Image: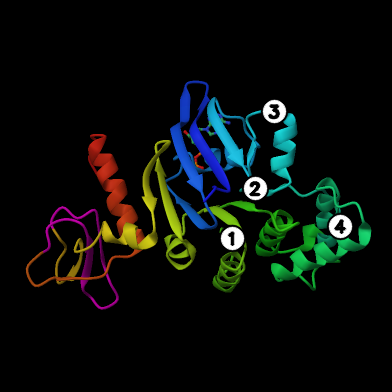
């Protein structure tokens, strides 16, 4: 199957900092989660794919257009990309409807009837159908976050790129966004610190660390890396990566040598992620 987007030996340097080492990834249809600690290179990768940032080396293709090729191909690719950066700065004084209408004009929706219908569609998708006439400045933080997502949904892009979309949303809003993203056609790439979102939503997980891909596979494959490595018992496992006393009074340990009388429990995405990170730090010679 032809990928919706691909990176071939793409790297990015900012002066002396290498934010992304040479990386090759193909993105197919589905929801793909990007996990990694702060500074891992997640935003850099998303900005490269969104064409907001040129790579230092390598080739990026979106919908068959080589975005690193030239201006015309980049413009063509941008028509198929929706992108919500971590921080969206809204123009002052606009209503929610007015803002989306303005973005739709920039996205070349010329006919006003169709454009307004599209604006109403995306407002409803993010549960802001009754907030169109409100000034953006009067919306709550969570509502502004959803408005930022709505602008990326205009025109139902083939590639939807969302940088930490669930930050600032309450549990209901997060669940609602999950519903929306799981129903989206095409390819959705989200960066997140919420491992539960990855477990609940993603067909594929990519873990970035230090500008390199450390894991790329399905959620069950990620969970399998932590099989029989998480325990619960009266005392902590020796050399565990993380331990904490649960509400039952028993101690849950991720990694390490289990204490006697402890039993194996099913790992979560967070457990698998913590173990991957610990292995990474160990390989780099960093002691916990
Ligand atoms: P993440 O999104 O995973 O937190 P980023 O992609 O923002 O990671 O950053 C990756 C690395 O690149 C970090 O070391 C960060 O400090 C550096 N970096 C990001 N943007 C810039 C920039 N504009 N100028 C210099 N360094 C940057």
Q: Nearer the viewer, mark 3 or mark 1?
A: 3
Q: CA distance from mark 3 to mark 1?
A: 37 Å
Q: CA distance from mark 2 to mark 3?
A: 27 Å
Residue 202 in the image, given as x and y percentages of width and height? 47, 61
Image-quadrant location for residue 154: bottom right
For the image, the number of numbered tags is: 4
Q: CA distance from mark 1 to mark 4?
A: 23 Å
Give the mark nearer the N terminus: 1 vs 4: 4
Q: Which residue is mark 4?
A: 98
What label sits on residue 87 in the rendered view? 2
Categorize mark 2 by other alpha carbons within 10 Å: few (<14), some (14-19), many (20+).
few
Q: CA distance from mark 4 to mark 2?
A: 19 Å
Q: Nearer the viewer, mark 2 or mark 3?
A: 3
Q: CA distance from mark 2 to mark 1?
A: 12 Å
Q: Secondary structure at mark 1?
A: loop
Q: Is residue 286 visible?
A: no
Q: Write down the region rendered in magenta.
A: 238-258
Q: Which residue is mark 3?
A: 70
What label sits on residue 168 in the rendered view? 1
Residue 282 falls left or right of residue 12:
left
Residue 176 in the image, given as x and y percentages of width and height? 60, 72
Image-quadrant location for residue 46: top right
Q: CA distance from mark 4 to mark 3?
A: 32 Å
Give the mark nearer the N terminus: 3 vs 1: 3
Q: Nearer the viewer, mark 4 or mark 3?
A: 3
Q: Secondary structure at mark 3?
A: loop
Label 3–label 1 contact, CB within 8 A? no
């Amino acid at each position: 199957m032809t990928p919706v987007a691909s990176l071939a030996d793409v790297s990015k340097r900012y002066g002396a900092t290498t934010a992304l080492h040479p990386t090759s990834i193909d993105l197919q249809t589905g929801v793909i989660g990007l996990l990694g600690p702060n500074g891992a290179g997640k935003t850099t990768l998303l900005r490269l794919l969104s064409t907001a940032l040129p790579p230092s080396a390598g080739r990026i293709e979106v919908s068959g257009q080589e975005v690193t090729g030239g201006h015309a191909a980049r413009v063509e690719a941008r028509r198929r990309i929706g992108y919500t950066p971590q921080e969206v700065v809204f123009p002052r004084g606009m209503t929610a409807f007015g803002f989306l209408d303005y973005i739709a004009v920039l996205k070349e929706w010329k006919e006003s009837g169709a454009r307004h219908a599209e604006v109403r569609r995306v407002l409803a998708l993010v549960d802001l159908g009754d907030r169109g006439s409100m000034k953006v400045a009067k919306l709550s933080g969570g509502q502004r976050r959803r408005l930022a997502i709505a602008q990326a949904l205009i025109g139902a892009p083939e590639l939807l790129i969302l940088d930490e979309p669930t930050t600032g949303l309450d549990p209901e809003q997060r669940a609602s966004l999950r519903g929306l993203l799981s129903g989206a056609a095409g390819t959705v790439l989200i960066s997140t610190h919420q491992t539960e979102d990855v477990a609940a939503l993603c067909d594929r997980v990519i873990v970035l660390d230090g500008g390199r891909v450390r894991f790329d596979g399905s959620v069950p494959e990620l969970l399998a890396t932590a099989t029989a490595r998480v325990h619960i018992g009266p005392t902590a496992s020796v050399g565990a990566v993380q331990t904490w006393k649960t509400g039952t009074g028993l101690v849950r340990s991720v990694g390490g040598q289990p204490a006697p009388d402890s039993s194996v429990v099913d790992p979560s995405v967070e457990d698998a992620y913590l173990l991957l990170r610990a292995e990474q730090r160990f390989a780099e010679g960093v002691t916990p």
